[in-house]
Amino acid sequence: MSVEIRPVPETDLRRWLESVIVAFGEDVNEEQWKLDQKTLEPNRILGGYEGDKIVGGGAAFSFQMTVPGGAQVPTAGVTMVGVMPTHRRQGVLRALMARQLADVRANGEALAALWASEGSIYQRFGYGLGTLNGAIDLARERSAFRRPPNPSVTFEFRDVDAARPALERIYDQVRSRTPGFYKRSSAWWDVVLADPEFRRGGAGRRYNAVVSRNGEEVGYVLYRIKNDWVETGPNSTLIVVELMGIDADAVEGAWRYAFGVDLVMSIRARRGPADHPLLLQMAEPRRLQLRVTDGMWIRIVDVPAALEARGYAADGSIVLEVSDEFMPECGGCWRLTVTDGRGHVEATSDAADLRMDVQDLGAVYMGGFSFASLGRAGRTVERTPHARDRTDALFVATVAPWCPEAF
């Protein structure tokens, strides 16, 4: 029996979840499901139906994502994609991706974004490695900074209700200028700030510390402590859940707080930028044990709309030929003309300066990679001299992209 991809009615949502969870080899967590229902959008959930049986599916969130230049671009945040082991290698995922991306395009969203369980899965559907993620593991005894602390920086514990206004305000200031961040709705903040047992992973409750400078709230750190006492004393780990600061001094202040908590032997953070500011703030940067991995994968669904939405560093004109095997309607030859930092895109029959796959465009779009780096990897083809350099002069971003939360 063939599998049909179609929207999942609300009456089938629980069965849909169970099919997707099986694909990940997990069990349904009831607390997690209660939280999921706050942010899942029923009209954006697709199921793979074999008759009445659901054998897999996927969903998407409606995001406003920051891109280079500070614009907020409608983006489909792809999530909870899976096919049951009984139906793997039968084209179900390919059909699901085709339907979902067609819906994204019809919805007027220029971008789709996701965190991949395995990077190899989504490249064949046109996703490019758009952002990197920097994780750290640091021994507290080697956490010295290169300069003295700012004496005007202070810290305050707050419960969720008291902390939330400051957290939202600080996050939005960082979001407005950081490619890869997306706007959090009120319901999304409800989920982010929930503290159910299943999230703790053996650690304790979450603490909320707000950072102030001369009385102004400028940063925060959300963290847990995983207690471990051995015969020689404490061997506990402080786990940073999320840390934000409106400027370099605020970021350093928040990290100083995290590194200064007593009875802790190590600090761990799993989300951060690849060009981590701590590398230039600490006395011994190698002690961070910074590990850079793939972050968000970006899929360009509408080339002209995506290119016109972002900002550019210089004026100029370039002809880009984009191939798209999975969605041929998204490919073509496009002239990008930048004036006063804004781009205008039109289809053209002129010869291309630079040829690329849609994955390559996804990799450079947020500013996480350059065309020069793609060239060093044997990706893209120059059709005119120095085409990569000329294109990089337009695309270069002053703020490296990253995303503080997997979705």
Image (cartoon, helix red, strand yellow):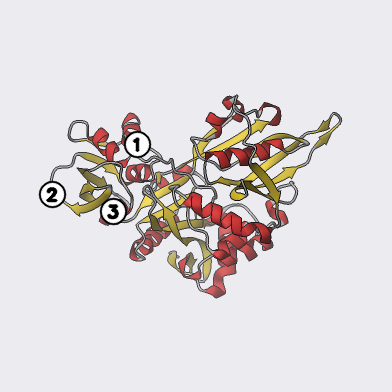
Disc assigned to residue 349? 2
Where residue 94 sits, quadrant-wise, is bottom left
In depth, the one of 92 and 100 nearer the eye is 100
Query: Mark 1: which amino acid?
Result: Ser
Cβ atoms at labels 2 and 3 below 8 Å apart: no
Q: Residue furthest left?
A: 350
Q: Position of residue 169 (x, y in %)?
A: 55, 56
Which of the 4 quarters of the picture holds residue 260? Answer: top right
Q: Say what secondary structure mark 3 lies in.
A: helix
Q: Which residue is mark 1?
A: 370
Q: Earlier in the sequence, mark 3 or mark 1?
A: 3
Q: How would you rate the neighbour count of disc 1 (Cα within 10 Å): few for under 14, some for 14-19, many for 20 or more?
A: many
At horizontal 19% and vertical 39% (from top left) the residue drawn is: 353
Inspect the image, locate mark 3, and give the three-letter code of the amino acid beneath it: Glu
Q: Residues within 10 Å of mark 2 (few under 14, many from 20)?
A: few
Could you tell me residue 194's position as x and y percent? 66, 59
In the rendered view, does 369 fall on the left or right side of 206?
Answer: left
- At 74% from the left edge and 46% from the top edge, which residue is drawn? 203
Local secondary structure at mark 1: loop
Which corner quadrant holds the N terminus?
Answer: bottom left
- Report if residue 407 is visible in the image: no
> Nearer the observer, disc 2 or disc 3?
3
Residue 185 position within the rendered picture, expressed as x and y whole percent measured from the top left: 53, 63
**Marks 2 and 3, how far apart in space?**
19 Å
CA distance for labels 3 and 1: 18 Å
Nearer to us: label 3 or label 1 = 3
Q: Which label is found at residue 308?
A: 3
Secondary structure category for the residue under label 2? loop
Q: Nearer the viewer, residue 332 or 20?
A: 332
Look at label 2 and name its amino acid.
Ser
Callouts 3 and 1 close, C-beta under 8 Å? no
Residue 358 visible in the snapshot: yes
